[in-house]
Amino acid sequence: MRKRLIVSAASALSLLLAVPASATDFRPGADGVGDPYYPTFGNGGYSVSHYDIRLKYQPATDELEGTTTILATATQDLSRFNLDFVLNVSEVLVNGRPATFATSGDQELEITPARPLAKGSQATVVVRYKDVPSTVERYDGYTAWRRTPDGAVAAGEPVSAGWWFPSNDHPSDKATFDVSVQVPNGTQVISNGVLTGTSSQAGWTRYSWRENKPQATYLTTLAIGKFDITQDTTVGGIPVYNAYSKDLGDNAAAARASVERTGELVDWLSGYFGEYPFSSVGGYVPNIDSGGALETQTRVRYGPGAFSDGSNTSVVVHELAHQWYGDSVSLNRWSDIWLNEGFAEYTQFLWSEHENEGTAQELVDYLYAARPASDPFWSVKPGDPGADHQFAAAVYYRGAMAIQALRNAVGDEKFFRILKGWPTERRYGNGTIQDFQAYAEKVSGQKLGDLLNTWLFTPGKPAVGPVAPGAAVAAPLVAGQAQAQLPTEPKSWKKIQEATAVHESRR
Ligand code: ARG
Ligand code: ZN
């Protein structure tokens, strides 16, 4: 008896010690991760390992309802924490106990758990919600959820998740995903990863998707509607799942003639970037053009407009290149967007070389010559374009010129080692331009600071283009002298531009 008493006194004491001395050690998590372009994107104080999203959607009314369960680990002692979300919430549970919540700003959901969360502890957060997502506008009239004649599409960069699930909405916090959505029988649901099952009950069909590799929140996507599905595997054995809205009209053939080459292109890209990082691949073409193409992980969203002028393999190459550059290796902050777009664009140049439609060198010579120094194009720094110019033409085209300049400086053998080594070394992680520079310097044994500074971080047209080794450098134009003759337009240029013009539309 006495012994028991001592034991319980000791356990009471250890309980006291486990909980920090006073509740004032627990602080609210920050309302952003500290991104220089978007201070309120993401949140501080925790990191997410998994999202389990279970929804029901009625296309006739655009009503979306359900729950998202989030598995997180506190990275500080938390008295409360935020999620990013725009829909109407009815209930929040943290570790099984009802939590209080409030909303603020564009997409802050502030959650105060019944018991504070100690640093290092795991939390299970359940959020229940119901809303009409297409009616919710944020960031000056933007909505990432768009209705279509037969369903809806959710996709968008740099943010879109908040229109269908609560999250830590920043690419620096990647997680695995289960997405399970019920729709009326006859309607289909497309999302990331592998379709693990479908089941029908009382007029509704549930589609369950799983992405088992780390995925950034903006790379999640959901498409609901009536689709023609094609399924196959790549020669390398990766399952391919593509979906085409039944409502594409004249664009249908061109879309299929492009997107059905996904398997072939993934195998071709693996030669440059190393093994494909995910366990499924494909794309979908909805019957709405909301912002062109987006490299949503394993399941690219292609706006039908990409194929309105006939087939376009260049856009497929671009979005698939992002699976390595952007999706498997992700940004730590949005200012480093060149690591995504410069490389995806440059890969289109490599595809042009492969197709004998112009070499990368011919493309950059053409681009450099076609834009005079007075063109505002040159005022954007691809390495730090500013939030307002995050997807400006310079990020893509000058970004690709920077990569050709790098190639010319280190030579093909080292260049292609860098191109493959970076996504291999950083697989499933994150990186910055400075990390990339350090890696390229290690592989090449050369200092690259001046070169990257000229091409990425200095506004204005560089005095000389990314000149091929051994090529003559044209003398700079003297004032009054006639504009030098433009090099001939490479054969691939039109399709490359079409693919990129699509990207430049807002979100
Ligand atoms: N990452 C997309 C692509 O290049 C472009 C997204 C454009 N986003 C925007 N807000 N304009 O494929
Ligand atoms: Zn891109």
Image: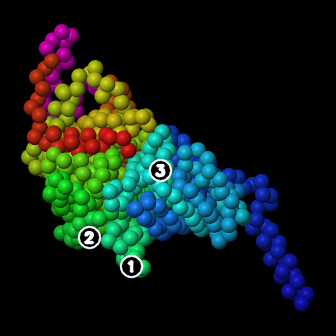
Image height check: is 12 above or below 377?
below
Q: Which residue is mark 1?
A: 200
The label on residue 135 is 3
Instruction: Give the quarter of the figure containing the C terminus.
Output: top left
Left or right, 74 with respect to 291, comes to: right
Q: x and y percent of residue 421 in the render?
A: 31, 54
Q: Earlier in the sequence, mark 1 or mark 3?
A: 3
Nearer to the camera, 146 or 283: 146
Q: Earlier in the sequence, mark 2 or mark 1?
A: 1
Q: Which of the 4 image quarters holds residue 297?
A: bottom left
The label on residue 104 is none
Image height check: is 124 above or below 310?
below
Q: How many other residues sit within 10 Å of disc 3, few (<14), some (14-19) or many (≥20)?
A: some
SS assignment at label 1: strand
Q: Looking at numbered disc 2 in the image, what kind of residue is underneath it? A: Pro
Q: Which residue is mark 2?
A: 239
Q: Earlier in the sequence, mark 3 or mark 2?
A: 3
Q: Residue at x 29, y 56 (%)?
A: 286
Image height check: is 397 above or below 318?
above
Give me the C-alpha separation between circle 2 and circle 1: 24 Å
Q: Is mark 1 within 8 Å of ligand 1?
A: no
Q: Looking at numbered disc 1 in the image, what kind of residue is underneath it? A: Ser
> Which stretch is magenta?
461-482
Q: Nearer the viewer, mark 3 or mark 2?
A: 3
Left or right, 218 with respect to 255, comes to: right
